[in-house]
Amino acid sequence: MTSMDKPNLLLVDDDVTFCSVLKPALEKRNFQVTVANDIASGIRLAEETDPEYAVIDLRIGLESGLEMVKKLIDSNI
């Protein structure tokens, strides 16, 4: 299976250790995983990668992950 066959998943969480554990676990389940550790990077990566799935922390620094979800839906990324 090539990376083109794998569904693209965006992981956004400010906990770097958590991301370093979750990313390989998701890759073992045949996802192509892109990681961002803040909302601005997450939105930029979403625009670049057009993910089919996203895992977004509810609290990213002082910002709400739900606001990022809203931005993703509103902008049709």
Image: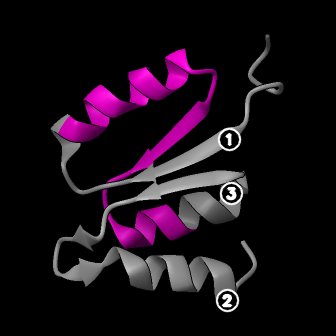
Residue drawn at x 36%, y 74% as measured from the top left: 65
Residue 71 percent location from the top left of the image: 56, 84
25 magenta-colored: yes
2 magenta-colored: no
Residue 38 percent location from the top left of the image: 32, 64
Spatial CA span between label 2 and label 3: 16 Å
- Residue named by callout 1: 8
- Residue named by callout 3: 48
Residue drawn at x 68%, y 41% as measured from the top left: 8
Question: Quadrant of the image for the C terminus?
Answer: bottom right
Residue sticking out furthest to the top: 1
Residue 42 percent location from the top left of the image: 47, 63
Of the image marks 2 and 1, the number of the one nearer the N terminus: 1
Q: Could you tell me the amino acid type at mark 2? A: Asp
Residue 45 or 69: which is nearer the viewer?
Answer: 69
Q: Could you tell me the amino acid type at mark 1? A: Asn
